[in-house]
Image: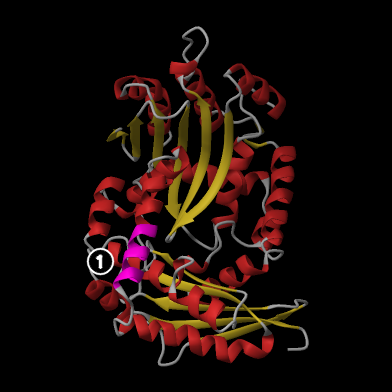
Amino acid sequence: MKVTREVLAPGVALTAIQTDKFKSASLSATFLTPLDRETASANALVPYVLRRGCETWPTMGEISVRLEELYGGALEPVARKRGETQCLGLMGSFLDDAYTLEGERVLEPAVELLTSLLLEPVTRDGVFLEAYVAGERENLIQAIRAQMNDKRAYAALRLTQEMCRGEAYGVDRLGSEEAAAALTPQSAWAAYQRLLSSAQVELHYCGSAPVQRVREALSPLAEGLKARRSGPTAALTCDARPHAGGESPREVADHLDVTQGKLSLGFRTGGADARGENYPALLVFSALYGGTATSKLFLNVREKLSLCYYASSSVEAVKGIMTVSSGVEFDKMKEAQDEILAQLEAVKAGDFTPEELTSAKQAVINSCQSTLDSRAGLEQYWLTAAITGSAETPEELIARLERVTAQEVAAVARGMELDAIYRLMGKEG
């Protein structure tokens, strides 16, 4: 596997992974732009409208026919966030040229389709089609509302909204329902023009084609993006605050028609994040504390004491925060919270065995190794690397993970500061 990263045009970079490991090749184009409450919903709508049609293939039906001609390829819109960067674009999967029946080339026509969708959308009176915007606006509203149906995910969302109130990270990747409902062809078109004008564009390819061929295939797209750029590339920053915002944690509770409570805790990591030397120790700490089935939270809070239906931790390493999610009976909220924090104190004190450390390290290493076995995993890994400015390969990260010590894990734990507590309670609770 050979990874090459190069700049094709101002604000346009290509990460090409040459490998014969997969039968399908992946191809994606992602606009990276600062996450902002005022523009998040409009930005999120753009890739979905672009996927509806372009000048050459103006309907979804015609696009589907074209994808079938490319050995049943797929090309889908995505709206993600990494730290305080909104990531918007199209992700494609196509049969690798090495496996076509008669040696046909799929890469070039796939790039042609991607280029047309990104740069030549169907328009009327100089903006997106009203029907396309109306349809995707309703889908966006429904997607925002659907987040409330998964109460575990909803609790995690509400925690970050409250913990990061006033910070860009508190904005949802899809924006708000109110902002989505107000979108028009004109405002969606304006968002599209802003992305073309100033967003950093990350192109990603994973397949067997040599990098020179990939570069040449993507050259028209890079040149088209360059021609539409009218200002400097937006800087991708992240307000990674190392410490909690007050002397005591912010506490918030919602009361909904639920039969099981949710308790979510948000921590600042004391400066440990994806850009720091202690990044591997942060990942191992989270796995040891609450990230695996052999973690402190799982074995003690859930299994031994039966205080939670589930209890787990995760880190958003780009932002520099850790969250703990748990499902708890309403009358056990305080007891569960106390025990979750007690297990953190144990890790801070180095109260964990060599076997626990080894298990946590292996879990994180296995996760990194699985990245190497997945085209989607590789795309996500290098997209995050582009945002953080890292050139570290998964193999190099694995080597650093293997060297993490118990002292480093305890030091990361001691940097954790509880910043917010969110409780989802029943209507009568």
Q: Is residue 106 left or right of residue 386?
A: right
- On screen, residue 391 above or below 300: above
Asked whether 332 or 165 is in front, the reply is 332
Q: Is residue 339 left or right of residue 54?
A: left
**Image quarter for residue 50?**
top right
**Image quarter for residue 108?**
top left
Number of callouts:
1
- On screen, residue 46 above or below 428: above
Q: Which residues are magenta?
A: 354-363
Q: What residue is rendered at 53% in x and 83% in y? A: 421
Measuring from the top left, give residue 354's x and y in whole percent: 29, 71
Q: What residue is rendered at 22% in x and 63% in y? A: 277
Q: Amino acid at mark 1?
A: Asn
Measuring from the top left, give residue 34's x and y in whole percent: 43, 56
Residue 360 in magenta stretch: yes
Label 1: how many residues lie within 10 Å, few (<14), some (14-19) or many (20+)? Answer: some
